[in-house]
Every structure is written in C-alpha cells, then in structure tokens.
Image: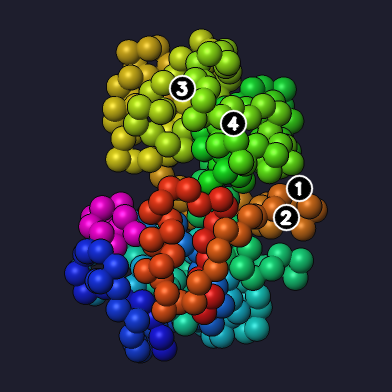
C-alpha cells in the first residue's frame, strides 16, 4: 500500500511517499480501505519532533489520526461492523494511528458509521476538530443554554465547528476573526465577531461564562479578563497551557487544559448534527496523499479557513 512515512523527525524533507505492507489485524480491529484523511497542526508538529512525538515510540512512523473509508476486513471478535460499511474515525490519539495510508487497522470501538449524507471528505476532517470542539465546550466547559461563550480564532478548523455547536446548544456566541471572515462566521451562528487586528477583546467583552482558547499564549492570557467569577477558560494548545494555567490561577479564573480523546458516541452525535444541517464542515483545501508537504505548509501559515484534507 502507499503511505507517508517518516524515519526521523524533521521538516517536510523527512516525509517519504512509499510502499508499505498492509497492516495486520489484531483483536477488536477492522481493516479500513482509506479514502480521505484530515490534516491538522498536530500532524506537522509531531513530524517535526513536537506535538505528540513523545508518544510515538520508535521510528519509522506513519502519521495521521483521522480518516474516512470503508471496512475491508474485520477481526473475528468484532460484531459492530460489516465488510463494506462506510465509516469514519479519530483513532489512538496521541499514540500512532497511521491514517496517512491506503489501509488502516482501526479499533472498532473508536470509529462510527458514516451516513450517506455526510460526504467522505467532510467525514475525514470532522473527527479531531469536531471532537475537540465538543469536548472543550461540553465536557470541559459545561456550556449551557443562555450562557455566553467566547471562541478565539473562530475561522479555524476547531473554531468554526465550536461556533456551530455552541449556537446549537443555545448559547450566545462571541468570536474573533479577521474582517474577511465576519460574514462567514455570522452565517454559522456567531452573534458577535471581533476583528482581532483592530479591536482589543477586553474592550468589548466581559463577564462571559466560558472562553474556548484556540490560540494559547498571550492571546489566551489576555482573554482571562473576559471571564466572569466562577467561569472557565479551556485552553487548547498544549505548548502554552502551563503559562495560561498560571495566569488563570493569578487572576482567579479556572483554566482547563484539554487533550482530545477518541469517542465514537460523540462522533455519532456530530454526524447526526451534520445530517440534520445543524453542523457543516468548511473544507479549506484538499491535497493528494503524496502532496502532504504542501498541506503542512498551508497549515503552518495559521490562516487556514476550515479544514485541510488528503484524498487517498
């Protein structure tokens, strides 16, 4: 099978488009014939030696954690799926999962059936960003109807999904984005959009129940001033979580870090919201598997509107 593999951590030059053996099934697994895979900042950070690299173990390594495809084979103890089922998933994170390949051995309890109304490329990009948004809003943030939530960097992969989920939950949604994205984000359910180039968020927002910090660092720390007493800031970037937590402690604001976890039940809910037209995934761009380096370059700009997906 064709796959992207790295034999040492590094820049795009470390990415090798190569031929590998089809993965073998263990108990509890299904073999997926892959059709598409989502690309996320955690992928290029890990390939560069950061991100989830400490969890990868010995190299070589096939990166990628989310996919959409069809079931090709099933282990003898798997009863929840059949050969030919259309499925999608976010698997094994933060350990190696091997989704940038033509075939994947996936844990059956971490994948979900893909409804026909959910296109394969949207399904491939929904897992990591969708689960991150869901778990940040509801598991960590305990967002309730009528509450106010700020979502920093609303046009990104996680941000644009978090806006829609918060709107669906009945919250007032405030987000930050460049002016070119304001109309787009309002169409997704944002009530207020602040231009971070020309406006300081603390001049316009106060006493909110929850902040979803997709930026981290100084941006997340500044947003602490917007949170009301008893409110929460959920910070996503792991590299700056300790400094945001420390600043939260000093300001008397609860800060929750998050590491997204595979969850097939939540994937089912996200797929259902997509089918019901309560959720859409904005595809920023698609690339063939062999052009993963180009996808990484686009992701590194930090200006991607929506999700990047590989076609396989």
Q: Which of marks 2 and 4 is nearer the N terminus?
A: 4
C-alpha separation, residue under disc 2 versus residue under disc 3: 30 Å
Percent coordinates x, y for residue 69 in the rendering: 58, 76
Residue 271 painted magenta: no
Percent coordinates x, y for residue 85 in the rendering: 66, 78
**48 left or right of 176 in image:** left
**For the residues bearing labels 1 and 2, Cβ distance under 8 angstroms:** yes
Classify 10 Å Cα crowding around label 4: few (below 14), some (14-19), many (20 and above).
many
C-alpha separation, residue under disc 2 versus residue under disc 4: 21 Å
Percent coordinates x, y for residue 162 in the rendering: 60, 41
Secondary structure at badge 1 equals loop
Q: Which of marks 4 and 1 is nearer the N terminus?
A: 4
- For the view shown, which residue lies furthest in the right direction? 276
| Residue to which mark 3 is pinned | 223
Q: Which of marks 4 and 1 is in front?
A: 4
**100 left or right of 156 in image:** left
Secondary structure at badge 4 equals strand
Q: Could you say which quadrant of the image residue 147 lies in? A: top right
| Residue to which mark 4 is pinned | 175
Q: Is residue 250 above or below residue 260?
A: above
Residue visible at 62% across and 41% down in the picture:
181
Secondary structure at badge 2 equals helix
C-alpha separation, residue under disc 1 versus residue under disc 2: 6 Å
| Magenta stretch, residue numbers | 44-56
| Residue to which mark 1 is pinned | 278
C-alpha separation, residue under disc 3 versus residue under disc 1: 28 Å
| Residue to which mark 2 is pinned | 274
Residue 15 visible in rendering = yes
Q: Which of marks 3 and 1 is nearer the N terminus?
A: 3
Secondary structure at badge 3 equals helix
Q: Nearer the viewer, mark 2 or mark 4?
A: 4
Classify 10 Å Cα crowding around label 3: few (below 14), some (14-19), many (20 and above).
many
């Amino acid at each position: 099978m064709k796959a992207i593999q790295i034999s040492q951590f590094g820049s795009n030059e470390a990415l090798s488009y190569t031929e590998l053996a089809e993965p073998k099934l263990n108990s509890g697994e299904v073999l997926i014939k892959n059709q598409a895979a989502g690309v996320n900042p955690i992928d290029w950070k890990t390939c560069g030696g950061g991100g989830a690299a400490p969890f990868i173990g010995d190299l070589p390594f096939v990166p990628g954690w989310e996919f959409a495809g069809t079931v090709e084979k099933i282990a003898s103890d798997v009863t929840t799926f059949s050969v030919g089922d259309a499925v999608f998933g976010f698997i094994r994170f933060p350990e190696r999962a091997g989704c940038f390949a033509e075939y994947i051995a996936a844990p059956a309890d971490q994948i979900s059936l893909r409804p026909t109304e959910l296109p394969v490329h949207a399904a491939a990009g929904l897992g990591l960003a969708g689960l991150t948004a869901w778990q940040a809003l509801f598991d960590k943030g305990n967002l309730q109807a009528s509450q106010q939530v700020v979502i920093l960097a609303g046009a990104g992969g996680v941000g644009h999904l978090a806006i829609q989920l918060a709107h669906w939950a009945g919250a007032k949604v405030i987000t930050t984005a460049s002016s070119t994205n304001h109309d787009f984000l309002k169409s997704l359910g944002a009530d207020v959009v602040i231009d971070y180039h020309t406006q300081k968020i603390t001049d316009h927002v106060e006493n909110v129940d929850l902040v979803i910090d997709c930026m981290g660092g100084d941006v997340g720390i500044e947003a602490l001033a917007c949170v009301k007493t008893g409110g929460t800031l959920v910070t996503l970037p792991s590299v700056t979580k300790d400094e945001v937590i420390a600043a939260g402690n000093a300001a008397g604001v609860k800060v929750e870090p998050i590491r997204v976890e595979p969850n097939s039940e939540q994937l089912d809910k996200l797929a259902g919201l997509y089918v019901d037209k309560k959720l859409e995934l904005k595809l920023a761009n698609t690339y063939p598997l062999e052009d993963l380096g180009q996808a990484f370059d686009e992701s590194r700009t930090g200006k991607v509107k929506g999700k990047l997906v590989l076609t396989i």
